Image (spheres, grey):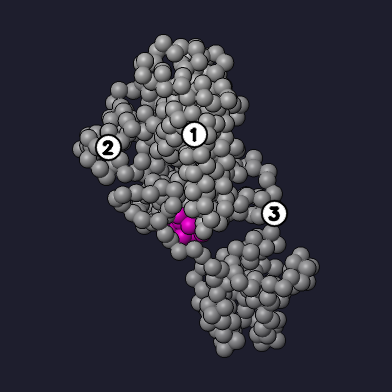
Amino acid sequence: MQKFKAEFDNSADLCIKYINVENISCAVITLAGMVNKDTVAISVVNPIIDASVKGETPLEKFNYIKDYIISAVDQTQVCTYEDAFNMIMSGFALFAVDGCDSMVSLGVQGFPIRAVSEPSSELMQRGSREGLVESVNINMTLIRKRLKSPKLKFEVINLGKTSQTAVCLCYMTNKVSKDILEKIKENLSKVNLDMVIEAGYLVPYLEDGGDFSLFSSVGMTERPDTICGKISEGRVAILIDGTPNALIVPYLFVEYFQHLDDYSMHTYFATFTRWLKYLAFFMSTLLPGLYVGISTFNPEILPGPILNKIALAVSTTPFSLMTETIFIHLIYEIMREAGLRIPRPLGHAVSIVGALVIGETAVSSGLIGGPTLMVVALTAISSYVIPNLYEPISILKFIFIIVGGLLGIWGIMIIFTAVLVNISSKKSYGIPFTSPIAPFKFFAMRDILTRCGWSFLSKKNIKVQDLPGSEVK
C-alpha cells in the first residue's frame, strides 16, 4: 500500500478499502470512475466481510478468498507492480492480503463507454449499422459475434511507455501467414513512443520503410463487418484501445476502390459504381493539372467553343491560370478544414460564405474565372468518392497543377509515370502493392475491374500468401 500511495502520490482517485479478515489485513484497490461501485460491493467487498475464511497462513486465506468467496469471473494473478498498475488503470480492482507476494485482479470495469452506433465515415445503404467504439473489448465482441469460429484469435499487447495502451491483433490462425504475423509483431515491438492514443501513431511502424510513397499500405476502417471480411482472407486487423478505427495489414491499392456495399448490390450496378470510383480518382488527381496544362500550352486540343470561354475568362481575371487554380484550391482546402474543426452550429456559416464569396462574388467581380471554378468543383466532388484516398489526392493535385502550368502535358505524363512506378515498386510485407493487377493475375480480375456474382466469387478462397508476387510461401 505504501508503494501504491507513493507511485500515485496520493492521487484523489486512488481508493483503498481495508478489510480485516480474522486478524489479517486485506485491501481492495480501485481507481474512482474506472470501476462499477455496485459490482465491487456485491461481488468483492461484501462477500469477504460476511464470509468465514478457512486457512491458517495468509497465503491459504488468500487462495480460499479468491477461489471460493469472490464471485467476480474475470480473475488474473498479478505478481509485479508493473502489471498491477496496468490492471488498476484499465478498470480492474486489485485484492491483496498482507503476507502474500501476489495480488489478484478482478474484472469490475465501470468507466463510461460510448454506445455502438453507425460509423460516420463509412456509411452503407445496406448491411449493418454497427461501428467500432473506443473500447477494445467491445470491438472484440463485435467481431466475435460475426465470426463464430475457434480459429479466430485475439492477441493483446501493451504499447506506449506511459499510456500502456492495449493493442489487439485479430486474425484467423488457419489463414494468416505466419511470416507476416511475426513481421507485424516485430514491427510493433519497435514502437518506442510514450503515448499511443490513436491508430495513426502505429501506421509508420507498420509501413515498409524507405518507399517515400504518398499511398499507405496500411488500411483503416470503422466497420467490424469489413474487418471480418479482411481477416477471413488472411489479413491481420489491429484494434487500438481508445480509438474507433482498426488498422488492416497487408493492404493493397485496389482495396481503396472496394466498398462493402459493392457485395450487397446487383453485380451490374456494383461494377458500374466501381468504374465510377476509378474515374473519380483520375478526375480528382489529374483534371486540374490537365486543365491548366492544356489551356496554357496546348489550347488546340480543346473544342472551339470551350476554348473561347476559357480565353474570355482568363482575359478578364488578373491572375495566370495556374495561379488562379492553385488559389481556389487553397481556399477550398481552408474551407474544408474550417468545416471540420469549427462547432457544428457554425458549419452552415462556412457553407454560406463559400457559396456567396467564392461562387458568386469572386466570379462576378472578375477575380476568378467561371471555367476554373467549375473544374475545382468537379475535382472536390470527385475526391470525396474515395474518402480514404483524400490525403494523397490533395497533394497530387497541387503537384500536377504546378507541373502542368510549367511543363504542360508532357510534365504531367512524367510525374504520372513517376507515381505509377512508385506504387508499382511498393510492397506490403512482401506482397506487391498493386497486386493482382501488377503482377497480373487473370482470375483475380473477377473482383477488381468488375464485381462478379457470389456464385463465382466463392469458387476459390484467395489467401494473402497466395497473391501473385508474394515472397511468403
User: In the image, residue 260 lies at what x, y percent?
Assistant: 34, 44
Question: Against 81, is 198 above or below?
Answer: above
Foreground: 89 or 397? Answer: 397
Foreground: 245 or 63? Answer: 245
State the residue position of label 2: 270
Q: How far apart are marks 1 and 3 (CA)?
A: 53 Å
Label 2 or label 1, whichever comes before in sequence order: 2
Q: Which amino acid does label 2 sit on?
A: Ala
Q: Which of marks 1 and 3 is in front?
A: 1
Q: Which of marks 2 and 1 is in front?
A: 1
* Quadrant location, the C terminus: top left
User: In the image, residue 453 lies at what x, y percent?
Assistant: 22, 37
Q: Residues within 10 Å of mark 3 (few under 14, many from 20)?
A: few
Q: How crowded is mark 2: few (under 14 residues within 10 Å), some or many (20 or more)?
A: many
Tell me the number on the disc at residue 162.
3
What element does badge 2 sit on? helix
What element does badge 1 sit on? helix
Magenta part of the chain: 132-142
> Is 21 positioned to the left or the right of 307 in the image?
right
Residue farthest to the left, as pictured: 455
State the residue position of label 1: 363
Foreground: 10 or 319? Answer: 319
Q: How far apart are marks 2 and 1 (CA)?
A: 38 Å
Label 2 or label 3, whichever comes before in sequence order: 3
